[in-house]
Image (cartoon, rainbow, N blue to C red):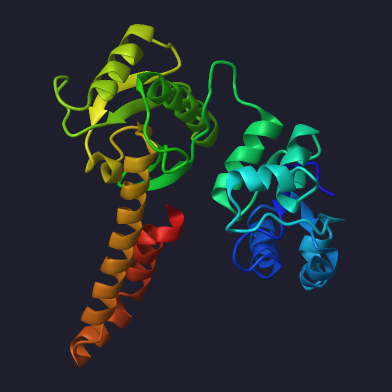
């Protein structure tokens, strides 16, 4: 085993379970050789897949469980069943016990949020968890949250999201004082819902040294990278996320159609293949 980061994996999560999770871990192992893995799930399914990747097998441990949180389980059902030793719960619990540095699951999102909150608890003063997206921008990357953990938010919850998002940015982007903006319909202080305006006042009055609050940002600022952290409630954030994913796919399809339209366009596509591969990677919706 390595002495680097150890990741606990819910191998049964997602639509395809170990058949996708294990190859994904193998790719991650190639990119980050200092990382080791702790798989939770059906050992009979996991082990043959892991053994197909000798480098991954050398830094992996498998812990068997037959209990799986289903994709259509309600969070309440997942809590009742999952706490009896599901692959998702055990992966999260490994972090709590100090056996892993992070837990990853492609499974039921609502269940993941509920089980994580119960097992790991929240930061002092923070009541609700959030889903955060690493958002590709013209300046690099930013963090957008919440993108769908909960629907609706009052001023205090938006304030909490700013706290969580800035803490994440300090670690992910290695910056001491991340810039933070509240997503709104305009940058003027008089615009927007009352809870958004109240959250803005709260952030300015708090004057937290570790947060560089920049006020309101608009939808087009998501792609510009105007701030390091964009804060919004889950309903709006999820729509923004799905819109970005759909737009990226639409642009990619337009490009494919354009380069098939004539012989000259096909030749041009071949000549510019390297540049278009770079563009494809940048607009890949899986990056969001």
Q: Nearer the viewer, residue 103 or 170?
A: 103
Left or right of 110 in this view: 59: right
Query: What residue is at 78 percent from the left and 58 percent from the top?
Result: 41
Answer above or below: position of 86 versus 99: below
Residue 6 in sight here = no
Residue 202 image offset from top left, x and y in percent: 34, 12
Q: Quadrant of residue 12?
A: bottom right
Residue 24 image offset from top left, x and y in percent: 64, 63
Query: What residue is at 70 percent from the left and 53 percent from the top?
Result: 10
Query: What residue is at 77 percent from the left and 61 percent from the top?
Result: 56
Answer above or below: position of 150 versus 59: above
Q: How many marks?
A: 0
Answer above or below: position of 82 versus 162: below
Residue 253 image offset from top left, x and y in percent: 29, 74
Q: Quadrant of residue 122?
A: top right
Left or right of 130 in this view: 12: right
Residue 48 in sight here = yes
Residue 43 image offset from top left, x and y in percent: 84, 64
Query: What residue is at 76 percent from the left and 39 percent from the top?
Result: 93
Left or right of 20 in this view: 146: left
């Amino acid at each position: 085993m390595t002495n680097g980061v150890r990741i606990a994996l819910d191998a049964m999560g997602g639509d395809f379970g170990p058949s996708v999770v294990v190859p994904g871990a193998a790719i991650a192992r190639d990119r980050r050789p200092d990382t080791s893995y702790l798989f939770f799930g059906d050992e009979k399914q996991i082990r043959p897949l892991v053994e197909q990747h000798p480098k991954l097998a050398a830094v992996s441990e498998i812990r068997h469980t037959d209990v799986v949180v289903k994709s259509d389980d309600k969070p309440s059902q997942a809590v009742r069943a999952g706490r009896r030793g599901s692959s998702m719960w055990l992966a999260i619990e490994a972090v709590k016990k100090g056996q892993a540095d992070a837990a990853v699951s492609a499974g039921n999102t609502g269940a993941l949020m509920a089980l994580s909150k119960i097992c790991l608890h929240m930061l002092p003063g923070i009541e609700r968890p959030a889903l955060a997206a690493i958002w590709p921008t013209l300046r690099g990357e930013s963090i957008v949250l919440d993108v769908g953990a909960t629907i609706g938010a009052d001023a205090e919850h938006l304030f909490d999201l700013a706290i969580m998002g800035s803490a994440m940015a300090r670690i992910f982007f290695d910056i001491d004082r991340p810039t933070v903006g509240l997503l709104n319909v305009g940058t003027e202080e008089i615009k927007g819902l009352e809870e958004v305006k109240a959250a803005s006042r709260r952030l300015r009055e708090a004057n937290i040294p570790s947060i560089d609050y920049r006020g309101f940002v608009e939808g087009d600022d998501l792609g510009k990278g105007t701030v390091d952290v964009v804060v919004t409630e889950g309903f709006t954030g999820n729509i923004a996320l799905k819109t970005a994913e759909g737009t990226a796919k639409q642009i990619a399809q337009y490009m494919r159609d354009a380069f098939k339209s004539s012989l000259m366009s096909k030749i041009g596509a071949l000549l510019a293949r390297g540049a278009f591969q770079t563009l494809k990677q940048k607009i890949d919706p899986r990056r969001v």
